[in-house]
Amino acid sequence: MKKVDCIVVGLGLAGIHLSFELQKRNYSVHHIHANLPGESTSVAAGLINPITGRRFVKSWMIEEVMPYAADRYNELGQLLKSNYIDRMHIVRSFQTASDENTWLAKTADSYLSQFLLEKADMADTSESLQLPELMGELKNCYRILTGELQRDYISYLDTLDSISVEEFDFEALSIEPNIRYQEVEAKHIFFAEGWRVVKNPFFEIPAFSPTKGELLIVKAPSLKLTKAYKKDMFITPLGNDLYWCGATSEWNELTVDTSKKMQNRLVDFVTKTIKVPFEIIHRRTGIRPSSKNRKPVLGTHPEYSQLHIFNGMGTKGSSLAPYFSSQLVDYIEGKVEIPHELNVQRYFAKKG
Ligand SMILES: Cc1cc2nc3c(=O)[nH]c(=O)nc-3n(C[C@H](O)[C@H](O)[C@H](O)COP(=O)(O)OP(=O)(O)OC[C@H]3O[C@@H](n4cnc5c(N)ncnc54)[C@H](O)[C@@H]3O)c2cc1C
């Protein structure tokens, strides 16, 4: 029997940051993980964008989470001897002059002003992209190499012999007096399963609203775009002439197959936007683990104090997972309370 402090189930961004945080605080951790269909981390663009939505509002808690995330990805890079965080500019198209004015008014915000450039500069791609007249540009945003991080972190845990690569089997779990799963005994178990939380019998709660996204990876050697560009959807450079194009959104659509309708929409988007030859290399889908209130869902099961959840990263796992994994561990250690709007226990109250 292997005895550890904690078991973490699922190694997307949520599970990776949680595992890293626990181990930084000297907890021993065993991991149960399988790359299952619909996982989000392996297909994400990984952008961290301080301004969001049609009204260009400041992303929720960005002042706290963005610097925190940068530190964590740098630390993970040191641990795994690689780089997972790049600075990236993000250019957005505007439909109207009024949109442009709303955007420019953000320069008055003492935090956001550090990101806003006075004028968007897309001169390098004016011949290769169909560009609108009105655009705005942000500097100092980030792109996280989420798929590479997930692959490398799993390999690292494998070298430590602290991962079982398998689908978690709830039938094999006993929880009292201690957590026991197959040959592993633990004090705590953390579920970080992404959208698959909907299959977890301990957390059958009305908190989640998974959102399917489809995207294309295209190769366009003469495009030479170095910034992420958004008009309806994103074109984000990945290096080696590859571009991430998407993504679509479908709520509560839990199949992982590509759909004709969404693929047509994506092909239409890239065809209208990219003016130079390109080739579609991959068609991918992922299911974002969104919650109904668009906030993380974390905390401890109301009945079983050894069972915890870390989920609801939605469209912003790159920035939210580092900060809130630390909050969750602080909570387990009795250092902080989880705000009501994020606390998983509120959903059980509703259920009852
Ligand atoms: C198309 C798309 C674009 C996105 N772009 C961005 C972006 O630009 N910026 C951003 O911040 N976020 C983006 N996201 C969102 C981001 O991917 C998520 O917020 C984040 O990756 C969620 O991480 P997670 O660990 O909660 O879930 P997941 O990444 O889904 O990870 C959960 C993992 O647990 C494993 N698992 C689940 N159940 C079990 C089980 N029973 N046994 C074993 N293993 C299990 C799964 O296989 C999976 O690997 C995007 C998402 C999509 C789909």
Image: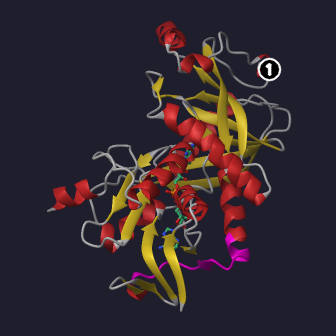
Q: Quadrant of the C terminus?
A: bottom left
Nearer to us in this view, 97 or 336: 336
Q: Is residue 67 left or right of residue 204?
A: right
Name the residue located 42 percent from the left edge and 87 percent from the top edge: 172
Q: Where is residue 80 in the image (x, y as percent from the top left)?
A: 75, 59
Q: Quadrant of residue 17?
A: bottom right
Where is residue 107, by image quadrant? top right
- Give 10 or 97, whichever is nearer the viewer: 10
Determine if residue 266 is in view. Answer: no
Label 1: how many residues lie within 10 Å, few (<14), some (14-19) or many (20+)? few
Q: Where residue 92 appears, x then y in whole percent? A: 60, 23
Q: Would you place residue 314 above or below residue 160 in this image?
A: above
Is residue 242 located in the magenta-colored stretch of the structure? Answer: no
Queried whether the magenta region covers residue 158, the answer comes back as yes
Residue at the (40%, 49%) spot, across then down = 296
Q: Can residue 143 be seen in this view?
A: yes
Q: Where is residue 267 in the image (x, y as percent from the top left)?
A: 63, 41
- In the rendered view, tell whether residue 276 sits above or below residue 40: above
In the figure, is residue 203 to the left or right of 37? left
Magenta-tinted stretch: 157-170
x 35%, y 82%: residue:
175
Q: Name the residue under label 1.
A: 127
Amino acid identity at mark 1: Glu
Q: In this view, does 185 lie above or below 77?
A: below
Q: Which quarter of the figure has residue 306? A: bottom left
- Give the residue displayed 47% in from the left and 49% down from the top: 324
Q: How many marks?
A: 1
Tag 1, which secondary structure?
loop
